[in-house]
Image (cartoon, grey):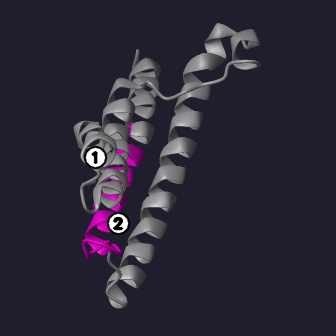
Amino acid sequence: MGLTVCDVIGRYLFNSPIKGASELTEILLCAVIFVGLGAVSLAEDHVTVDLLTEKMPLAVQPLRQAVTGVLSGAILVVISWRLWIYADQIGGYGGSTTNLSIPIAPLGYFCAICAFIGGVITAFLPLERFIKRLKQ
């Protein structure tokens, strides 16, 4: 946010924008989103829609949460795998940003790792809670 504010001030007041500000903003936004994914997964604060689930019996809820957690986690792991492959492709041809020539592949690997961690957390927490409930 600070970078964008400084860029806008420089652009409109001094007619001198920050070189590569849009590239840096895109990179930072991507990094913040994927770092936040792990935090959201850990807090179990994913966006949910409960049109049908609130009408289900309470006894079914732990199983439903475990199944949706495992499925959501699996989807995040698949996204992580595809991000890794895409980062490999970008790294193979030396892809970088236009103005600042920042390599893009490391960001792809970072996002893949964050998505994998988020996927594991997303699958593990509701499954662990379900297994503990079964043991009671």
Q: How many marks?
A: 2
Reading the image, the residue beneath label 2 is 108
Residue 84 as seen in the image, left or right of residue 18: right
Residue 109: quadrant of the picture = bottom left
Quadrant in which the C terminus is drawn: top left
Compared to residue 110, the image places residue 42 above or below, namely above
The reply, left or right, for residue 40 in relation to residue 74 is left
Residue at 46 percent across and 25 percent down: it is: 130
Question: Percent x, y for residue 29?
Answer: 35, 47
SS assignment for the magenta stretch, majority? helix
Q: Quadrant of residue 122?
A: top left
Q: From this viewpoint, which residue is outermost toward the front?
A: 14
| Residue type at tag 2 | Gly
The numbered mark at residue 125 is none
Amino acid marked by disc 1: Asp
Is 3 a magenta residue? no
User: Mark 2: which secondary structure?
Assistant: helix
| Residue drawn at point x = 28 percent, y = 40 percent | 13
Residue 16 percent across, percent down from the top left: 25, 54
Quadrant location of the N terminus in the rendered image = top left
Q: Are marks 1 and 2 in contact (CB under 8 Å)?
A: no
The residue where tag 1 is placed is 7
Magenta part of the chain: 97-121
| Residue 56, horizontal then vertical, whole percent | 73, 14
Classed neighbour count for the residue bearing mark 1: other residues with Cα under 10 Å, few (<14), some (14–19), many (≥20): many
| Residue depicted at x 35% and y 81% | 95
Mark 2 neighbour class, 10 Å CA radius: few under 14, some 14 to 19, many 20 or more: many
Q: Earlier in the sequence, mark 1 or mark 2?
A: 1
